[in-house]
Amino acid sequence: MNTFHYRIRRGAVWLVLLLSISTLVAPIAFSQTNDQPRSTPSVTPDQLVETQSRPPKPLSPMSKLGVAAAVMLVSLIVLLFSIRAWRAGNLFDREYRFPPVASVAIRLGGNRSGGCMATIRFRGRADTITAMDSRREDS
Amino acid sequence: MKCPACRTVFSGPVPQCPTCKLSLLRLDAKFGAVPRHTRYLSDRSGRLPLREIKKLRALLRIFEKKFPQSLFSVFVTNGVPSGSISEYAFWLANRTGFSSIEAVAGDNFDLLLGIDVEAGMAALIIGYGLENYLTEDDLQAALAVAENAFRAGDVSRGIRECVECVMNRMREIARASEAHKRVGDLVAAGANNR
């Protein structure tokens, strides 16, 4: 499996995860929350009073909005990451072409490359030439 | 343009470096037989894990899919015998058959990243075809992006960062070139209509 397939599969996993989260969160966010706890015949009056004295707090409209916004934000982030991965994996087979160069000056006897290059020294002596030094030297 | 050996700046079609007399023929004598290499990535140092090699090959394959004219090759070695990685990269770019035999002169859009792990040096070289689009500054910027990873000893991450940087830059240039061509076509069409 190459990076391309791996990224597509990762995107799909993320989407499935997002859908699972939204299916779990959405019913909670939008359900009716004024359900009364059911009492059973065996419950004593004292216990019933105790249970009824602490009714579950219903979600405020702001909380619902917050949950919805969070879900949307997460899905947006997942979508952005997926698009990035798909683009990097060239999912849409986008090709870029350069017009060929008509005539070139052959240098140093090389018929494929004339030595247009950049070099760096990333380890070694004290008089290290790093990419930054090389740029400075050029300018 | 600079000489790969002595870094003397020169311009024009010189058969050999005016200072150190470097030429491809001299490098043939210096380096001898072309080393064993594979498409996309050759690790002669044996330092890259197999898993990383597979991942990098996949990335380089994507590069080729995006830029069908170009082949980005990477050659990792454990020291260059009697020479520097810049000379070696210049020699490899001209002597190894990384891409097709027809890819010569202006039709050569290939890139080669040579890394000498032992000496701690890297060189990024391009074919004649890309010289109109990528500058030495672009190449230097791509190496600068990878420098920290190389310095930390993470060669595979450095290669990945370098390839991705070149990929982004080439995409920008190709898009700009396409837009420029479109404008040119529109102007030509307008002139024809008149």
Image (cartoon, coloured by chain):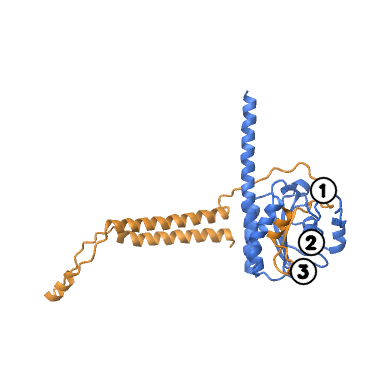
Chain colours: A orange, B blue
Residue type (three-letter) at the residue carrying disc 3: Gly
Find numbered disc 1 in the image and state the secondary structure of the residue it sits on.
Answer: loop
Q: Which residue is mark 3?
A: B79
Q: CA distance from mark 2 to mark 3?
A: 10 Å
Neighbor class of circle 2 (other Cα within 10 Å; few <14, some 14-19, many 20+) is many
Side of B51 relative to A126 (left or right): left
> Measuring 80% from the left and 52% from the top, which residue is drawn there?
B9
> What chain does badge 2 belong to?
B
> Measuring 58% from the left and 60% from the top, which residue is drawn there?
A3
Query: Which residue extends farthest left?
Result: A45
Q: Are marks 2 and 3 on the same chain?
A: yes
Residue A49 placement (x, y as % from top left): 14, 72
Find numbered disc 3 in the image and state the secondary structure of the residue it sits on.
Answer: loop
Q: Does residue B178 sit above or below B113 in this rendering?
A: above
Q: Between residues A129 and A35, which one lies in front from this camera angle?
A: A129
Q: CA distance from mark 1 to mark 2?
A: 18 Å
Residue type (three-letter) at the residue carrying disc 2: Tyr
> What chain does badge 3 belong to?
B
Residue A83 placement (x, y as % from top left): 51, 53
Tags 3 and 1 touching, CB below 8 Å: no
Rendered image quadrant of residue A20: bottom left
